[in-house]
Image (cartoon, grey):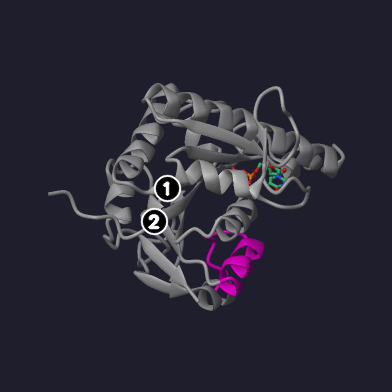
Amino acid sequence: SAPAPVYKRILLKLSGEALMGSLNFGIAPDVMNFVAGEIKSAIDAGVQVAVVVGGGNIFRGEGLARGGMDRVTGDQMGMLATVINALAIQDSVERLGLEVRVQSAIRINEVCEDFIRRRAVSHLENGRVVVFAAGTGNPFFTTDSAAALRAVEIGADLMLKATKVDGIYTADPFKDKTATKYEHLSYDEALNKRLGVMDQTAMVMCRDQKMKLRVYDMDRPGALLRIVNGEPIGTLVTV
Ligand code: UDP
């Protein structure tokens, strides 16, 4: 028989860049299908799945500001970019036969619901995937911080950060051949060593609220299901 999942409710953070696949901009259909399949495997195992998606494949406020744009306007464009990505995830998940709702931190009611915590929890309890869009709704924050915030708000048992590497390393494994992977790390260690896992705001939020985080390589098929079934893939970060 199939192993029983060890988590009841998870929050998965996907960066916008992850959705580009081999493209230079926008959304790769093959990646969307893959991501949807991974989400479905967790739902089919009986796990409640919430998603926070980034917008870096379209716009980042910081980058726009470097080009001279007002930072707040740039951040608003970045947040709207995450809404675009959330709609793409909604579509790909729905095509696999699952129910899914997008909830935005910025009101945009013609395309999705507003973020209402109790409604989000109710969707999750009814087996619907909930995709949180528009980050925190505030400029100068990131979608990593939004993911930490939403994970805490909905009472997730685990936050997952999907990255290009299979966990957190002592140094960038793409640049440093001697880099080794952490199996387990505390938030204070990650903060002190400035390990580039998430921005500090997100890490402090997770630390103070005792949220568990697992950093893993999203590209490996089946990884999400294995994690919800308790396999120690990637790196675990705890207080
Ligand atoms: N953003 C924001 N407030 C938030 C979340 C995001 O202003 O709470 C803006 C910010 O400009 C950011 C952009 O949205 O650069 C896209 O989010 P992020 O860079 O976190 O996306 P990712 O790196 O995950 O693709």
194 and 139: which is toward the camera: 139
The residue that mark 1 highlights is 48
Residue at (63% x, 57% y) in the render: 149
Element type where label 1 sits in the image: strand
Label 1 neighbour load within 10 Å: few <14, some 14-19, many 20+: many
Quarter of the rendered image showing ligand 1: top right
18 and 175: which is toward the camera: 18
User: Does the rendering let one see residue 24?
Assistant: yes
Q: Is residue 203 magenta?
A: yes
Q: Which mark is residue 144?
A: none
Label 2 neighbour load within 10 Å: few <14, some 14-19, many 20+: some
Q: Which mark is residue 8?
A: 2
* Distance between the alpha carbons at the discs numbered 1 and 2: 6 Å
* Left-right relation of 153 to 174: right
Provide residue 102's location: percent of width, then percent of height.
Answer: 58, 34
Considering only vertical position in the picture, is 216 above or below 113? Answer: below
Residue at (57% x, 33% y) in the render: 86
Which quadrant of the figure has residue 63?
top right
44 and 143: which is toward the camera: 44
Q: Point out the stretch of residues depicted in magenta.
A: 193-209
Residue at (63% x, 49% y) in the render: 117
User: Does the rendering let one see residue 14?
Assistant: no
* Left-right relation of 78 to 229: right
Q: Which circle's residue, 1 or 2, is located before the other in the chain?
A: 2
